[in-house]
Image: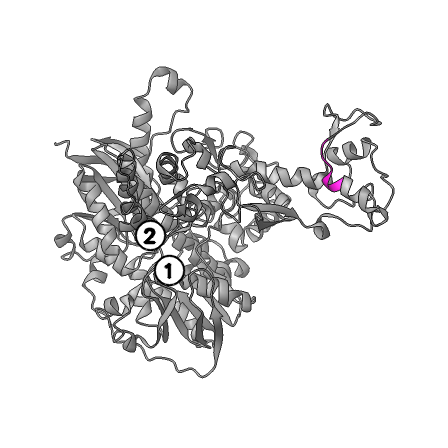
């Protein structure tokens, strides 16, 4: 036994079947296998979870007493673990004030640089250049760069009085506390219709400055001041910029408001004094608007004869270089992190880790190649190797053939998905994988088949003079009734062309993107595809009870976890921890509900079935029709009760596709639909797309996968680079002609598969 290997004994988390495996440390290890085979169960739910639990056990008694005791994963023993750091695809933040600059700490160093050598020298502290500090933020927009304006047409029904419900906001609904309070102030005629209010009365109701009250008729509040309701709500939006309210509360506010660029700071977020200080003629707000690659060039040219800023410049240059190397050099520092894709968020997190001097860490990454053009995959490999070379272990869940081939060790899980998976089919050096019969090995050995017959087209949709984001007056034709792929390196303008220019002109188009579909932990596969209602009705008919009894969102829910099945604990300085509810054992329901059976199964057992198992169990046509669609898109291994928030981007997208296959639209738009797909699933996905095309639908796919690109009927390639160096259409035509285009990065890599 050696401490150079992580030793796992009898792992049986989720679908893992008593896995015993040794994995070498200080290497780049790739975990692969078909979707649902158990890769994440082994790496994330077993190795990472146990490493996190053991780390907490090292804390002092005082700290542990105030933290929940994490449940041990379903494994007998794991030896020789290192301190874990997960770099996943979760969005960095929904905070309106979080930008690429703030999360990478580049904003901190650049503010310090301007405070030390900026001209004119005003002897300002660094926080005077921050839009998150009173000294630096724009007083008109409070550092948001946007002004919140209320839509009075939505907010008010002027045909009604206050008592009749003239204020449409949910907080002022009939008999609400706030409405009673407003009427009790006795400042307005509550029986008078708002259309009869004078301009002065209406302005007082909406935008009055806080005024002291002395004539209110009731004692409804301790607050004896009145502030205009529109003014108050606009300020509430701003005050919530630092919070993350739940979706219902956010929607209750945002429905009535629009965002407009601040007239005072023009979106820069900073006050005039901060904007007046410059380095080499560039203000800090102008610098933040530049692409990261251009910021790097700017910083390298900064001249400081006194050399007081040399350590700052060195630090800033290093951080910028990592971001460029990782493939996000086209981003700007002022870019809100909420607008980043899952792949971009992951790469930003990865770049931050390159500045970490700790060694013998265990880095756990979830498909870091997502959203990357084949050209940029090479840069990614360089970064992964650097993390390993610092003395760390780098464990990656990945489907990309190029990354699998460059791994130092491979753990292949399978042989198939769900209950047919959960075994280690190969554990060893990459060259040994090719001698096995696993699906991964078969696909890696497989030579590209002949090119399909391209479908001809006559009619087309036009995009004329598109200038969104970095697009440079682009005019292009998208053929009707065929498969078109939009290609190009990350940041070249693909999404801008389709989502911002094409989709608004075709509102009936079915858009299947990478946005998460799980708003809450209560949403699951069954509820999303619409069969949970049918299942509950079957239980109701079989037991003689009301269908609502079989919902975990009703009074039937476990009182301790409120139907969640898990208990969540905020860890503050660590990821939040979730443990299975000890009262219902994760089943969500009260015991008396679980005693009611349908064909020998209770409702929790049915929700624990996979789609494939449920299709065999139910003999109800309206249920099975939905289940067959899920099987068709390769999601038969998912459980009916699986939370939507646990799905990968690829699984989410295929789930959306399954729901849309029941519809008949003319235009289908898919954004990187092969995300999360194993190599063996690409053929199945293509057949789904081909079925749509054969039904005379137009299918437009934004894609990096070369196997899908080579099968497209038509290709529109953008570039040649990302950011301001992109935004041009450099090719329109068939894949055979694309490989002849010297300017196209896609064409260069496509040569190897066509």
State the quadrant of the C terminus: bottom left
Along the horizontal axis of the image, is 680 left or right of 456?
left
Residue 595 drawn at (x, y percent) = 54, 37
Residue 206 colored magenta? Answer: yes
Residue at horizontal 39 percent and vertical 24 percent from the top: 69
Write down the residue under mark 1.
Answer: 724
Q: Are marks 2 and 1 in contact (CB under 8 Å)?
A: yes
Residue 545 drawn at (x, y percent) = 63, 43
Residue at horizontal 45 percent and vertical 84 percent from the top: 458
Which region of the structure is painted magenta? 205-210
Report the disc number at residue 525.
none
Observer-nearest residue: 559 or 294? 294
Along the horizontal axis of the image, is 596 left or right of 74?
right
Q: Secondary structure at mark 2?
A: helix
Q: Residues within 10 Å of mark 1 (few under 14, many from 20)?
A: some
Q: Is residue 244 visible?
A: no
State the quadrant of the N terminus: top left
Residue 277 drawn at (x, y percent) = 43, 41
Observer-nearest residue: 215 or 606? 215
Residue 390 colored magenta? Answer: no
Write down the residue under mark 2.
Answer: 294
> How many angstroms separate mark 2 from mark 1 (CA)?
10 Å
In primary-sequence order, the first of circles 2 and 1 is 2
- Asked where in the image residue 544 lies, by quadrant, the reply is top right
Residue 152 drawn at (x, y percent) = 71, 50
């Amino acid at each position: 036994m050696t401490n150079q290997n992580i030793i796992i004994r009898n792992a049986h988390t989720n679908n893992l079947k008593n896995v015993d495996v040794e994995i070498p440390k200080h290497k780049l290890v790739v975990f692969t296998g078909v979707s649902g085979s158990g890769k994440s169960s082994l790496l994330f739910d077993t190795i990472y979870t146990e490493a996190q639990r053991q780390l907490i056990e090292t804390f002092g008694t005082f700290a542990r007493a105030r933290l929940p005791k994490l449940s041990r994963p379903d494994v007998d023993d794991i030896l020789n673990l290192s301190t874990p750091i997960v770099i996943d695809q979760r969005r960095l933040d929904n905070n309106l004030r979080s930008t690429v600059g703030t999360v990478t700490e580049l904003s901190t160093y650049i503010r310090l640089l301007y405070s030390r050598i900026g001209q004119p020298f005003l002897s300002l502290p660094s926080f005077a250049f921050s839009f998150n500090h009173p000294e630096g933020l724009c007083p008109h927009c409070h550092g948001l760069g946007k002004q919140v304006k209320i839509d009075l047409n939505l907010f008010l029904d002027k045909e009604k009085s206050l008592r009749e419900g003239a204020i449409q906001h949910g907080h002022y609904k009939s008999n609400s506390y706030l409405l009673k309070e407003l009427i009790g102030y006795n400042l307005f005629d509550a029986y008078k219709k708002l259309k009869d209010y004078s301009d002065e009365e209406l302005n007082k109701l909406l935008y009055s400055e806080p005024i002291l009250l002395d004539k209110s008729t009731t004692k409804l509040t301790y607050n004896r001041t009145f502030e205009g309701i529109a003014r108050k709500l606009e300020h509430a939006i701003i005050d919530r910029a630092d919070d993350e309210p739940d979706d219902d509360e956010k929607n209750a506010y945002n429905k009535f408001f629009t965002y407009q660029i601040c007239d005072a700071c023009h979106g820069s977020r900073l006050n005039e004094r901060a904007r007046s200080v410059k380095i080499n003629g560039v203000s800090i707000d102008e610098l933040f608007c530049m692409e990261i690659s251009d910021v790097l060039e700017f910083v390298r040219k900064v001249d400081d004869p006194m050399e007081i800023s040399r350590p700052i410049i060195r630090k800033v240059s290093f951080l910028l270089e990592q971001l460029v190397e990782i493939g996000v050099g086209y981003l700007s520092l002022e870019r809100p992190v909420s607008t980043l894709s899952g792949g971009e968020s992951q790469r930003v997190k990865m770049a931050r880790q390159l500045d970490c001097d700790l060694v013998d860490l265990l880095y756990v990454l979830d498909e870091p190649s997502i959203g990357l053009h084949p050209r940029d995959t090479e840069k990614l490999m360089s970064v992964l190797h650097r993390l390993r070379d610092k003395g760390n272990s780098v464990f990656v869940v990945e489907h990309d053939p190029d990354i699998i081939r460059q791994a130092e060790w491979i753990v292949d899980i399978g042989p198939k998905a769900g209950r047919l998976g959960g075994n280690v089919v190969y554990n060893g050096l990459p060259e040994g994988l090719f001698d096995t019969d696993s699906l991964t090995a078969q696909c890696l050995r497989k030579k590209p088949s002949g090119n399909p017959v391209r479908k001809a087209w006559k009619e087309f949709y036009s995009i004329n003079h598109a200038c969104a984001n970095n697009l440079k007056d682009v005019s292009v034709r998208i053929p009707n009734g065929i498969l078109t792929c939009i290609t190009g390196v990350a940041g070249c303008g693909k999404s801008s062309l389709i989502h911002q220019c094409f989709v608004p002109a075709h509102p009936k188009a079915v858009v299947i993107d990478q946005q998460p579909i799980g708003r809450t932990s209560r949403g699951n596969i069954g509820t999303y595809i619409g069969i949970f209602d049918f299942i509950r009705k079957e239980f109701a008919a079989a037991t003689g009870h009301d269908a609502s009894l079989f919902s975990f969102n009703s009074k039937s829910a476990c009182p301790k976890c409120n139907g969640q099945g898990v208990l969540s604990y905020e860890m503050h300085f660590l990821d939040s921890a979730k443990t299975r509810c000890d009262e219902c054992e994760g089943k969500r329901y009260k015991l008396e509900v679980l005693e009611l059976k349908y064909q020998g199964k209770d409702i929790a057992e049915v929700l624990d079935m996979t789609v494939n198992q449920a299709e065999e169990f139910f003999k109800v046509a309206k249920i099975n029709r939905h289940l067959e669609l899920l099987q068709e898109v390769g999601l038969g291994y998912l459980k009916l009760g699986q939370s939507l928030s646990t799905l990968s981007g690829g699984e989410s997208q295929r789930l959306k596709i399954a729901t849309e296959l029941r519809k008949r639209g003319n235009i289908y738009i898919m954004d990187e639909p092969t995300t999360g797909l194993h190599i063996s699933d690409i053929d199945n996905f293509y057949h789904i797309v081909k079925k749509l095309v054969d039904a005379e639908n137009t299918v437009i796919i934004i894609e990096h996968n070369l196997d899908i690109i080579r099968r497209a009927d038509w290709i529109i390639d953008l570039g040649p680079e990302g950011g301001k160096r992109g935004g041009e259409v450099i090719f329109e035509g068939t894949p055979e002609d694309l490989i002849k285009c010297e300017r196209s990065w896609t064409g260069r890599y496509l040569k190897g598969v066509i």
